[in-house]
Image (cartoon, rainbow, N blue to C red):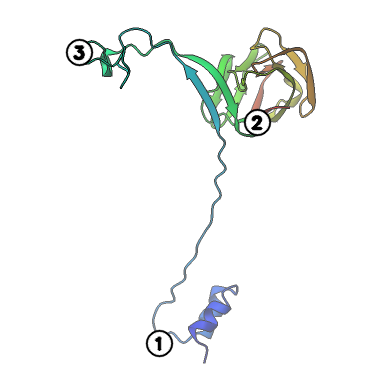
Amino acid sequence: MATFSDYFREASKDKVDIKSQVKLNGQPLKTFKSFGEQVNTQEINEVYTRDLTGDIFIWDNTTFGTWDDALWSEDADLTGRVLVRVIPQNNTYSEKFISSYFVDTTSNVTISNEKAIFADTTSYITSRILYDNDETINQAILSAVPLIGTSNLTYSMSADNGSNWETVTNGETHTFTNAGEKLRYRVDSSGTAQLNTVTIKKI
């Protein structure tokens, strides 16, 4: 007579076959399944600075830490911060169009269902700064995964925050004519197209 130990050892067999091997005494056969999922995350660090000279409360500061003189909470003005560093993990950022946080400008492009949808010949999308670590950027790689309209898409990168856009070849290392410190990408379309991901890596 088969035991439940036999049942677990033979778990790879079809459920009907297993049921015929186990004496259940009229009880229903219970099966258990487990599933594993892997979640891939990416990290990008943004560092901001702000000149706090004024009336904002700074704890334990001899000048700006005086009760009833300095302001805090909703009374303090926290505007005017300046982005000084953008450092993605492994110098690589992959845009999967889950949100538009790292998208700077678009024209006739819709971001929906984890893709960028280009409408016509005047469509383009540019990114925010995706690498800025106070060092000269001489080379980078852009790797894109289009869904449709592959031949309509043109890829560019800029190492100087968009002052000069240089056309690049998808998946190949590009050496910048105009080196700089702030890396961005741009995608233009000459017709309808859809883009799944754009990955940009500073070399």
Distance from Cα at disc 3 to Cα at disc 1: 80 Å
Residue drawn at point x = 71 percent, y = 11 percent: 165
Which residue is label 3 attached to? 68
Which residue is label 1 attached to? 25
Which residue is label 2 attached to? 92
Q: How many residues crowd mark 3 within 10 Å: few (<14), some (14–19), many (20+)?
A: few
Residue drawn at point x = 25 percent, y = 14 percent: 66
Earlier in the chain: of badge 3 and badge 1, it is 1
Marks 2/3 in contact by CB < 8 Å: the verdict is no
The kind of residue tagged 3 is: Asp
The kind of residue tagged 1 is: Asn
Looking at the picture, how far across and down is residue 199, in whole percent? 67, 29
Residue drawn at point x = 36 percent, y = 14 percent: 78
Looking at the picture, how far across and down is residue 156, in whole percent? 72, 17
Distance from Cα at disc 2 to Cα at disc 1: 60 Å
Relative to 68, does residue 14 appear above or below in the rendering?
A: below
Q: Can residue 72 be seen at all in this image of the molecule?
A: yes
111 and 15: which is toward the camera: 111
State which quadrant residue 191 falls in.
top right
Distance from Cα at disc 2 to Cα at disc 3: 47 Å
Earlier in the chain: of badge 2 and badge 1, it is 1
Q: How many residues crowd mark 2 within 10 Å: few (<14), some (14–19), many (20+)?
A: many
Looking at the picture, how far across and down is residue 62, in whole percent? 31, 15
Q: Can residue 20 be seen at all in this image of the molecule?
A: no
Indicate the quadrant containing the C terminus: top left, top right, bottom left or bottom right. Answer: top right
Residue at disc 2, secondary structure: strand
